[in-house]
Amino acid sequence: MTGSRLVDGKGAVFLAVLAAAAVLVPVLNLTMPEGSPLHVPTYLVSLLGKYLAYALLAVSLDLVWGYCGILSLGHGAFFALGGYAMGMYLMRQIGPRGVYGNPVLPDFMVFLNYKELPWYWHGFDIFPFAAVMVLVLPGLLSFVFGWLAFRSRVTGVYLSIITQAMTFALMLAFFRNDMGLGGNNGLTDFKDVLGFSVQAQGTRVALFVLTALALALGYLVARAMTVSAFGKVLVAIRDAESRTRFLGYRTEHFKVVAFTVSAAMAGVAGALYVPQVGIINPSEFAPANSIEAVIWVAVGGRGTLVGAALGAVLVNYAKTMLTGVLPDAWLFALGALFVLVTLFLPRGIVGTLIERLGSRRAKARLPGPAPDALAPELAEEGRGS
């Protein structure tokens, strides 16, 4: 695989914009005085970081939907599991600074009369362990789920429905207090991450930069998979799975690998999301969140990766603006946006641009004179006849 294939034109522009944002936003936040028109407020840094975490989730979904044809309506579950893994680490860092002053048990466990820390919380006071769990928890769930579903040749709308059922079941489970994960309130009131205050300006900037780097790395991983021979098989599975299977490919193996990598990426996105918003609760498992992620990808352009990230940022920016003015109208606007994109931009924003640029280049490469130049010759031939 050559470098030119790994990073094409749109990818180079995307990475350049991402690198510029990773440099300019911290500089404008840390060096410009608050009264300056160039100053980027700290709250805006966290908001932009949240958008980039959503963009990484969208790229992970586009990897399986855009290139493998797996319409997952449960990617919010992988995002939330990664978020809970990070939230558990952040809760263990609070220590005796909680409301009840217990050095081991989080406040909600003290309130619910827990006598000791549940076994599955052990190890989350160590960051490397928590970082591994961010990948392992969503990756393991997706591997088991994908292995069972793809071996049974569940496809299409049936697969979408059971992915949605999976995330809904997890949401109901996490709402229970006896899960030991905060119940309805979830995990919040975080203090430190790696010894640095999560509320500090420098920490907010560092989280933004890390999220930008994670998005760039996630894009490169997804791009490397899709331009390789592995990616060609994924596209073949998307377009004609039965024919691909008849050619001798174990299609379920390819789908499981892509699904697992995608889920791990979504988990990383959730882990970066949590310290920037300051909370993780069972509502992140809500099926509506997974459906909204599908809309991001559709708006930006399915099967483009860059378009998925762009769609996530644009739709969430619109959500921020509209909910501040007309909070009750957002869901109607989101539904209308999806209908309009489906009718008038079925390939999404980036997909449509790529298609139009490709057609222009094809016309420019056509041999012979242009059609207008042939008009006099055709007219002269008509007179002669």
Image (spheres, helix red, strand yellow):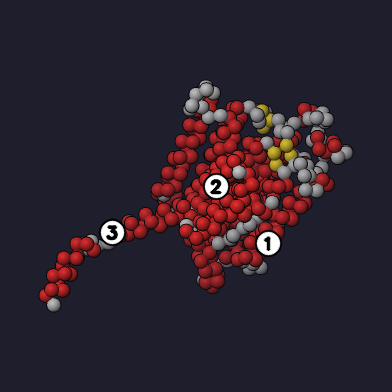
**How far apart, in angstroms, are the residues tagged by discs 2 and 3?**
37 Å
- Crowding around mark 3 (Cα neighbors within 10 Å: few <14, some 14 to 19, many 20+) is few
- The residue labelled by disc 1 is 162
- Give the CA distance from mark 3 to mark 1: 47 Å
Do callouts 1 and 2 mark residues in contact (Cβ within 8 Å)? Answer: no
In the image, what residue type sits under mark 3? Arg
User: From what the image shows, is residue 249 above or below residue 182?
Assistant: below
**Mark identifier at residue 365:** 3
Q: Earlier in the sequence, mark 3 or mark 1?
A: 1
Disc 1 secondary structure class: helix
Chain-order first, disc 2 or disc 3: 2
Which residue matches tag 2?
315
> Is disc 1 surrounded by few (<14), some (14 to 19) or many (20+) residues within 10 Å?
some
Which one is closest to the eye, mark 1 or mark 2?
Answer: 2
Residue 280 lies left or right of residue 336; in this view the side is: right
What x and y, as percent, mark residue 327?
A: 63, 44
Residue at image position (44%, 40%) is 16
Is residue 206 in view from this perspective? Answer: no
Q: Position of residue 165 (x, y in %)?
A: 70, 59
What residue do we see at 19% from left, 62% from top? 373
Mark 2 packing: few (<14 Cα in 10 Å), some, or many (20+)? many
Indicate the amino acid at tag 2: Val
Q: Where does residue 2 sit, x and y in percent of width and height?
A: 41, 50
Return the mark for residue 353.
none
In the displayed structure, 44 sits above or below 364; it is: above
Mark 2, mark 3: which one is toward the viewer? 2
Amino acid type at circle 1 is: Ile
